[in-house]
Image (cartoon, grey):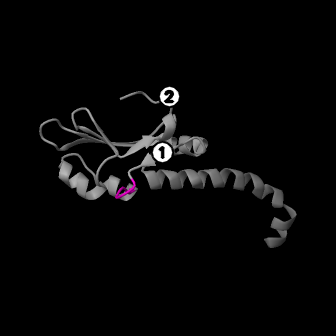
Amino acid sequence: MLQTLKKNWYFLVPAVLVAVPLLITVYISTKYNYSMGDAWVVFQTSTKAKTKFQSQKYTERGFAKVQPGMTGRDVFEILGVPLERHDDDTRWHYSLPVSGAGYYHERTIILQPGTGKVASVINRYRTPESPKQ
């Protein structure tokens, strides 16, 4: 077996060229909780992505714990104070693009007006082609 690999090492090169990007894409998908399609876009544009995260308490694991129906207080306890709040304090941004970068990891919590409960959680990779919300 080893002798065969030594003679035919050039067959391994295409396998490695396919396997390494695939493994990195699987890692990105798992780490950020993205679909494989989004993870592939992250892989392809990773040098262009510039994201500022809330630095005191924010973690990806903590963000994944936030679910619709939780109170704003619960979110504060898990993630801390957001970087920015908009729309009458119903849109909390835990990440922002750096210097107007087109590619970044968007982490936003949308609260129901009046109740202060989480209506939705936005966890996606933004590109210049992404639809505005």
User: Secondary structure under badge 2?
Assistant: loop
Q: In the picture shown, does residue 107 fall above or below 31?
A: above
Q: Nearer the viewer, residue 4 or 80?
A: 80
Reading the image, the residue beneath label 1 is 51
- Spot the residue most to the left: 114
- Residue 90: x and y, percent? 23, 37
Per the rendered image, the range of residues in magenta is 55-59
Quarter occupied by residue 6: bottom right
Q: Residue 129 bears which disc, if any? A: 2
- Residue 14: x and y, percent? 74, 51
Label 2 and label 1: CA atoms lie apart by: 17 Å
Camera-near label (2 vs 1) is 1
The structure residue drawn at horizontal position 18% and vertical position 52%, both measured from the top left corner, is 73
Q: Nearer the viewer, residue 70 or 10?
A: 70
Of the numbered discs 2 and 1, the one sitting upstream in the chain is 1
On-image quarter of the N terminus: bottom right
Cβ–Cβ under 8 Å for marks 2 and 1: no
Q: Nearer the viewer, residue 7 or 100?
A: 100
> Disc 1 residue type?
Thr
> Disc 2 residue type?
Glu
- Residue 123: x and y, percent? 38, 44
User: Secondary structure under badge 1?
Assistant: strand
- Residue 125: x and y, percent? 46, 41
Q: Nearer the viewer, residue 11 or 45?
A: 45
On-image quarter of the C terminus: top left
Left or right position of 18 against 75? right
**Res. 75 visible in picture:** yes
- Majority secondary structure of the magenta segment? loop
The structure residue drawn at horizontal position 18% and vertical position 47%, both measured from the top left corner, is 69
- Neighbours of disc 2 within 10 Å: few (<14), some (14-19), many (20+): few
- Spot the residue most to the right: 7
Q: Is residue 87 magenta?
A: no
